[in-house]
Image: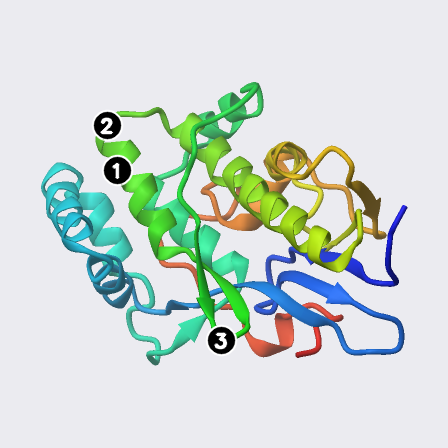
């Protein structure tokens, strides 16, 4: 199945800030290949970071603020009263997306019946020998579609499906370099059905997916865990950054 002793590991755990794609070699620390760039913990700083992408992003934010002032203010209020910093967990990123889209229960139910979605941007940025997913572009992409009146259910499905496609395609390129055709999944989001749909579309057909032991997750459960507003989660309220003690075990070694 594999042409070398290397194995690709994809860890997607909502509370682990070190989630990402890793290369694993026998008796050696895991080597990070693709990680998620952290976002500022304050909504105002997040908006500033998006606007700094380019002139088009800055103009888009102005249009969005005029069209959806309540949503804009909800994002701006994220982290109010908390110390400034950065947060790299998927929980925080997906919670910000939930607030930015104003996800509702009806969106979750409708998204579960969609066969495919739109392409949401996940920019890959190289820094030294490592690659990072710049999620600022993702938020800009979501708001651009929302301004175009794309339904929330479609955006919700596309958010996860596009992530799977981007990571799958990157894993395929890494597999060619490492001469391996196996990808092992771990983390509580690795079984998310929308993400898995995109992952299988992004990975080369020759790749085998190995399932690490994980808790099963349904479309609705995964979205609740990621921050959309169902159950006790209020999508209008700022998400709380996970405390250090809440981060899951098995964090990847640098």
Disc 3 designates what residue? 128
* Sequence-wise first label, 3 or 2: 3
Residue 90's spot in the image, x, y percent?
A: 53, 58
Q: Which residue shows up at 61% across the image and 37% down it?
A: 202
For label 1, the crowd category at 10 Å Cα-Cα, with few meaning under 14, some 14 to 19 and many 20 or more, is some
CA separation, marks 3 and 2?
37 Å
Residue 159 is labelled as none
Nearer to us in this view, 66 or 181: 181
Residue at left offset 69%, top offset 47%:
190
* Pick the front one: 10 or 105: 10
Q: Can the viewer see residue 251 in this picture? A: no
Percent position of residue 228, x then y: 47, 43
Residue 144's label in the rendered image is: 1
Judging depth in this view, the residue of 74 and 198 nearest the camera is 198
Could you tell me how far apart the alpha carbons at marks 3 and 1 are, in whole angstroms? Answer: 31 Å
Counting from the top left corner in percent of width and height, residue 53 is at 24, 58
Q: Nearer the viewer, mark 3 or mark 2?
A: 3
Q: Is residue 81 above or below residue 118?
A: below
Which residue has dot 2 on it? 148
Please say if 173 is above or below 76. above
Q: Secondary structure at mark 3?
A: loop
User: Which mark is first along the chain, 1 or 3?
Assistant: 3
238 left or right of 62 in image: right
């Amino acid at each position: 199945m594999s042409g070398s002793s290397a194995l690709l590991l994809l860890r997607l755990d909502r509370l682990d800030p070190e989630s990402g794609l890793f290369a694993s070699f026998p008796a050696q620390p895991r080597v990070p290949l693709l990680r998620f760039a952290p976002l500022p913990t304050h909504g105002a700083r997040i908006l500033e970071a998006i606007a700094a992408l380019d002139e088009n992003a800055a103009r888009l934010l102005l249009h969005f603020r005029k069209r959806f002032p309540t949503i804009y203010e909800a994002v701006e209020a994220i982290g109010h009263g908390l110390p400034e910093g950065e947060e790299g967990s998927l929980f925080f990123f997906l919670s910000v997306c939930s607030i930015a889209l104003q996800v509702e229960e009806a969106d979750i139910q409708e998204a579960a019946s969609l066969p495919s979605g739109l392409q949401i941007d996940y920019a890959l940025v190289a820094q030294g020998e490592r690659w990072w997913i710049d999620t600022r572009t993702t938020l800009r992409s979501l708001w651009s579609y929302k301004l175009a009146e794309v339904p929330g259910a479609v955006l919700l499905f596309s958010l996860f499906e596009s992530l799977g496609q981007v990571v799958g395609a990157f894993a395929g390129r890494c597999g060619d370099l490492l001469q391996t055709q196996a990808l092992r999944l771990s983390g509580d989001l690795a079984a998310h059905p929308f993400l898995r749909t995109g992952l299988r579309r992004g990975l080369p057909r020759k790749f085998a997916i190995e399932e690490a032991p994980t808790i099963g997750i349904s479309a609705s459960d995964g979205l609740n865990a990621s921050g959309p507003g169902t159950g006790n989660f209020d999508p209008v309220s700022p998400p709380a950054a996970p405390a250090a003690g809440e981060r899951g075990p098995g964090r990847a070694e640098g």
